[in-house]
Amino acid sequence: MIDLKELNENDPLKRIVERQNEAEEFSPMDPPDAYSPPAMNPISYDQMPSILQKLMDEHKVAIGEIEAFEGVLNRLRQEGITREVVEEGGTSRFFRFLDEKAVPHNLKEERVLFPQLQQKLLESGEHSQGMDRRTAIDMLEDDHLKMIQLAAVTLNLLSLSVRLPDQASREVTLDVALEQGSMLVELLRLHIFREDNLLFPMAVRLLNEETLSDMKVEFDELSAG
């Protein structure tokens, strides 16, 4: 049986918020909006170090691709599955973007930014309690993995639905693909929001200018490679 009290106490994002500000109580019937978490202290783009501005610029490109993909999903809901929509109308472009741009973007974060910030969060006690100390970094890394999983499932189901000869099977497969695709869209949007408005301000607060400058060099090397 799940211990809800322990789960609540070990939530890393909740603990981070509590340490930044005295968290107000929320009713389970009226939780805070995911895009408006309590004690959020965003920093404007102009005040961000250049390394974080670069990541935010890549996020803006990603948001455009996400919105275009969502439009394709809506078109599939209205018109049904066709080879043209899947292969030429936007889905191929979106999955190409994930492979060529989003995955390298995530790898740069995982290799350069996340380790430095993870160490600082652990040192400052901004983590869950218990043997397995989790921070916001662990949650964001989980998002990266979920993104790959959802993208693979959505792509495979869309490709399969085009090839199925039976109309009923094709429609069922398409429905599942659209559901997974919508989950992917929402995951990516929320992930970008959390990084821009929670994680990057955290980095500004916890990492000094020298560390951020060194990280920028590593980022540039990874981008060039």
Image: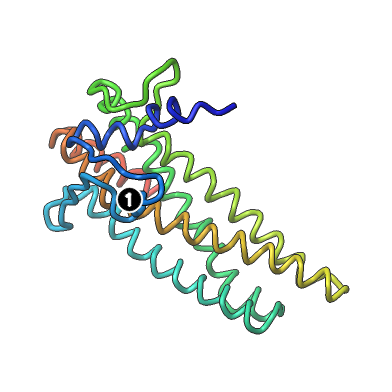
* Residue occupying the point 25% across, 26% down: 120
Circle 1 — which element? loop
Q: Is residue 161 above or below residue 81?
A: above
- Quarter occupied by residue 114: top left
Number of numbered discs on residues: 1
Q: Nearer the viewer, residue 181 or 220?
A: 181
Residue 53: quadrant of the picture: bottom left
Where residue 73 appears, as percent x and y from the top left, is 58, 73
Chosen colour scheme: rainbow
Please determine whether, in this image, residue 108 is positioned above or below residue 46: above
Residue at 69% x, 62% y is 176
The amino acid marked with disc number 1 is Pro
Task: Judge by depth and name the residue closer to the eye, 110 or 29.
Answer: 29
At which x and y percent is residue 8? 40, 32
Q: Nearer the viewer, residue 170 or 63?
A: 170
Q: Residue furthest bottom?
A: 79
Quadrant (top left/top right/bottom left/bottom right) for the N terminus: top right
User: Residue sitting at 53 percent across and 58 percent down?
Assistant: 184
> Is 207 situated left or right of 35 in this image?
left
Figure check: 26 above or below 196: above
Q: Farthest residue toward the top?
A: 131
Q: In this view, does 94 lie to the left or right of 118?
A: right
Quadrant in the picture for residue 101: bottom left
Crowding at label 1, few (<14), some or many (≥20) Cα neighbours within 10 Å? few
Name the residue at 65% across, 74% down: 86
Residue topped by disc 1: 32
Indicate left or right for 34 with 214 as reference.
right
